[in-house]
Structures are given as structure tokens and as C-alpha cells.
Image (spheres, rainbow, N blue to C red):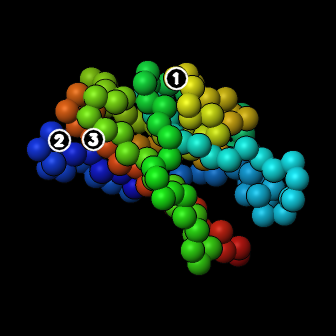
Amino acid sequence: EWELRGPNGEIKSAGKVRNLITSVGDQYYAGRAALSSGLPAQVTGMKLGTGSTAPAKSGAGAALVTYLSDSHQAIDGSYPTAAAGVVTHRVTYAAGKATTASPITEVVLVTDALANATSSAANTIARALLSGIGSKGAGDSLQITWTHTLLGA
């Protein structure tokens, strides 16, 4: 889910899309659940992009396609949370962060968010394409919330 707000707090766009947990993400959750040592790296944040390749479990589409400069952002304080089989991550991009005149079209949940560079598939837990979010002006803020439901089938 995302919510883009203008400088005076009004909602400019909002929406909800399905994300895809990558093969690396599957191993991340399995490893975090079962291992007592050799744990996968913790999710540290999100990155944005302008690519349009469809999300995929592995290979093309399993990582950020076109990195948006200065869009590396750490997970918000008090996140992640886990309750009733649902893991929630949230990031808030403040005014002045990750600004672009181009539409933001992709987002990834990663283990290397502190680097101002694209993330490889090996560091990408999940990826989603965003539709209708538009561009982020210098005075806008953007909040993105991921939920992963791990209830089995």
C-alpha cells in the first residue's frame, strides 16, 4: 500500500498492489523461522525505481530494474511487526527524499537499504510494480507499507 501526500498533507495518490516475495525472500522467511545460526540478513529498508519489468521469483524481475537516486530508506521505527501470521514493514520518505519528475513505478524490500545504489536479486526479499503513484515532488512525502501473510495453504 502507498500514500503520496503533498506539502500541505493532502493525499495526492494512494493505492494497493500485490507484491511478490522472491525466491530469496522465501529463503529469508524460512531461514529466519528455522535457523539458530547462519541467519539470513535482516530486512533493512526499501528502494524505489522507474522500471516496468514484471516481478518474478528469480532472474529478471526479482530485483530493482531502474534505481531512483536517493530512494534508499531504512524501515520506520517500531517496524517490522508480526501478528497473526502477518509481517508488516513500513517506510516513510520525507519531503526532499527520493524526488523525481518521472512516475515511481517499482519498489523493493531489501537487506541493503543503506546503500544509495540499486539492489541485486540476492538482496531483494520482495518486489512490486506501482501503478498510479505518479512523481514525488520536493515537498511531498510518501509512505509505503508491505504486508506478507504467512499462513500456509
- Determine the secondary structure under disc 2: loop
* Residue linked to disc 2: 6
In the figure, 73 relative to 128: above or below? above
Q: Amino acid at mark 1?
A: Asn
Separation of residues labelled 3 and 2 (CA atoms): 7 Å
* Residue linked to disc 1: 116
Residue 98 relative to residue 87: left or right: left
Q: Earlier in the sequence, mark 1 or mark 2?
A: 2
Q: Characterize the local packing of mark 2: few (<14), some (14-19) or many (20 or more) Cα atoms within 10 angstroms.
A: some
Q: Are the two marked residues, 3 and 2, in contact with CB atoms closer than 8 angstroms?
A: no
For the N terminus, the quadrant is: bottom left
Residue 25 relative to residue 44: left or right: right
Residue at the location (33% across, 54% down)? Answer: 15
Can residue 4 be spotted in the picture? Answer: yes
* Residue linked to disc 3: 141
Residue at the location (31% across, 24% down)? Answer: 100
Where residue 21 sits in the image (x, y, percent)? Answer: 64, 52
Residue 77 relative to residue 136: left or right: right
